[in-house]
Amino acid sequence: MNTARQDRLDRRRFALGAFLLILAAAAIGRLAYLQVRLPQVVPVDNRGTENFQPKRGSIYDSHGYLLAASSTVYDIGATPYQIEDKEALADRLAFALQEPRSEMLAKLKQELSYVQLKRGVDRSLAETIKSWKVPGLQADPRASRVYPHAALAVAVLGFVNEEQEASHGVEARYDEELGGEAGFRVAARDAMGSVIYRFYPPQHGVDLYLTLDRNIQYAVEEALAKGVARTGASEGLVIVMEPKTGAILAMAVYPTYDPNTREVTDASVFVNHAVSATYEPGSVFKVFTIASALDAGTITPASTYYDAGQIVVGGRTIKNSDSLAYGQTTIPNLLAYSLNVGSATVSTQMGARRFYEYIRRFGFGQLTGVDLAQETAGWMRAPGNPEWHESDLGTNSFGQGLAATPLQVLTAICAVANDGAMMRPYIVTRMVDGATLTETTPRMLRQVVSPEAAQQTTEMLVHAVDNVDAVHQAVAISGYSIAGKSGTSQVYTPSGGYDPQETIASFAGFAPADDPRFAILVVLDRPQKEQWGTQAAGPVFREIALQLLTLLAVPPDSVRLAGLSGSGVH
Amino acid sequence: MASNQIAISRRSNWLQRSVAQLFHDLGAWLYVVAVVVLATVLAFVYLAQASYAARQIELMVDLEKKLDLLHEENSILRLQIAGHEDPSRIKAEARAMGLGEATRVEYIEVLLDEAGPLARGNTTQSLPGSGANSGQLSALQGRNGVTAWPDVRFVSSIAQQFQGWISKGTAGLGTR
């Protein structure tokens, strides 16, 4: 009996011990599993993912002055049915938001689930409104792009709208770099079934430093606005570039707009006409014709030709702009007096193949590669193109019958200024991503013409400024050698042919001529009071050049050259 | 009396047997207790870790909010500074103060490399002169690098400088 009872007890003890051991083993196994195994990420639902918007990078000028930055603003809104005393709230809101009380009350009385009361208020005001703790009244933060200098450099900068969409300029071209990458937090379940969060932080956008100089940009915009007002032009633009590097120091388009508000009647003002619009460059183009012919050996600075006042090329008669005949004429005077007959004579002597080869080398009909959005390549007919006509060889030589962007024209002028070496124009000089700095190095595109040909052309351009009274009066600056060329082109109408009344006046040049620090192109569209390039665009060029010489601390030639010759001036 | 003694004796025997049995079985029970304690410790470690992680996350979220706020305030200040630096504002204020564009800029000769009397000691002073370069600086100095003073070239350079100023910047000096 005792033995049987003892057996039963032993079995029970064994069963209990085994049960406890299995339980403990299961607990240990489970704990070990949970500790060792990575949590299994199982999305909870769609609402479990939260996005974190990156901060858009700032844009600075070359000296570090802020041109564009992101900030947080607040949209004040309300859920009308949740608001009890609408009259009292309308009073408070009208005072705080500086809006008409009637307007506030009308919005609060709307039978909508949400009404917007005011967009883009600052944080202090939003905090004040939040502190009222009125049920149904809310202040929602959102990112906002702020341009502290309003319209300054807007053609270059572009803008970012309320939906954080970049448009035009640097904002659009560098949208990916400036915008960064959104971060997100995913709600998930771990192995225990608990909700956990996996956080992927946002990658904030990089900061951009432009080649623009804020002070130069300001001076340029002011001079351009004055020039447009003085001449009655419908539009105008100016580009300032460093010939030796291709860095764009200023780029201004008129009319302009405030990128903070973008209140415009015509959306075409958003377009940067310096890179996205084309025009017929007119006589400025003769610079490239002459430089090409000098490089090709077709002419020398001492060459002469007979100017009969007209020449027939491909069956089309080409005349000088004043319809006069100049007789035996030198090449420097061809440029100085901007003679179409001489230019056509030179291009026909070069021959179509060589002429167009050089024009391509000067970059016409191709993108310059500038780092701005919406650059266009312009348009040019050449042999082989079914639309090309033999007469184009003549008209193209003085910048008619082809379309170029202002930036293409200035880049080509810079090539002449820079001993024939064409530099790629660029606007972003460095990108800063936290501790990582990426700098843009100037890049030479090609040697367009020989240094000798470029220097000979430059001397002719200086001769033109110094010896033609009208040009001298308009652009010369005492103490400095200026190389420049005016252009007055006819305006091509959509119906075909040229408008006999309207012109596009331009002036391109650089200074100091022997060691250029800057090159400027001024283009005025349809000036009414002065139609010629020299008289309309020349004074704008001069005003800008004067300010640049001061801002860039360029000493007069006598001081600078004396210093170079080692006579003691540094 | 005798029956009471018998009952006490039986209870005493049962207790002795039970204790003896317990001691006999204690070896197996110890394992069970040890396992349960271990499981508890592991569970405690797990919970402590989870709790610590939760506290850290909470702290991080707080710090992140503070950082965001600082960023926002910094952004506002940067924009305010940029507004104060606006060229049109500066120009307007300058005009209000009676300032205007320079009507005449004069370039004068200033040599930075020549050591003069004030260079003795620890001070370096630029002096006007001509043709300053390292070679000339050496020529002006004695064998031990002590500046020879007064120097004829230095005096003549001063005279040349003042001559330039007196003649309204036309004697080799650029004006515009």
Image: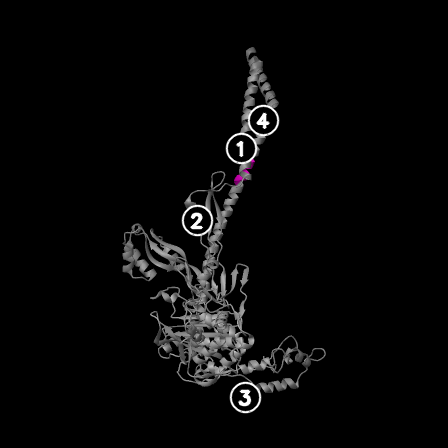
How many angstroms separate mark 1 from mark 2 (CA)? 35 Å
| Lateral position of residue A484 relative to residue A493, left or right | right
Q: Chain of mark 2?
A: A
How many angstroms separate mark 1 from mark 3 (CA)? 102 Å
Instruction: Judge by depth and name the residue closer to the eye, A443 or A22.
Output: A443
* Three-letter code, disc 4: Trp
Marks 1/2 in contact by CB < 8 Å: the verdict is: no
* Circles 2 and 3 on the same subunit: no
Secondary structure under badge 4? helix
Q: Which residue is mark 3?
A: B166
Task: Please give the range of residues in magenta.
Answer: B40-47
Query: Can you name the residue that lies furthest to the top here?
Result: B2
* Three-letter code, disc 1: Ala
Q: Position of residue A449 (x, y in %)?
A: 53, 73
Q: Position of residue A51 (x, y in %)?
A: 44, 50
Q: Which residue is mark 1?
A: A27
* Three-letter code, disc 2: Glu
* Circles 1 and 2 on the same subunit: yes
Which residue appears at 60% of the width and 85% of the height?
B158
Q: Chain of mark 4?
A: B
Instruction: Judge by depth and name the residue closer to the eye, B6 or A59.
Output: A59
Question: Residue A50 got which mark?
Answer: 2
Instruction: Judge by depth and name the residue closer to the eye, A447 or A554.
Output: A447
Q: Which residue is mark 4?
A: B29
Q: Position of residue A334 (x, y in %)?
A: 47, 81
Look at discs 4 and 1 and give the one toward the viewer: 1
Q: How is the image coloured?
A: one colour
Which class describes the residues within 10 Å of circle 2: few (<14), some (14-19), or many (20+)? Answer: some
Which class describes the residues within 10 Å of circle 4: few (<14), some (14-19), or many (20+)? Answer: some
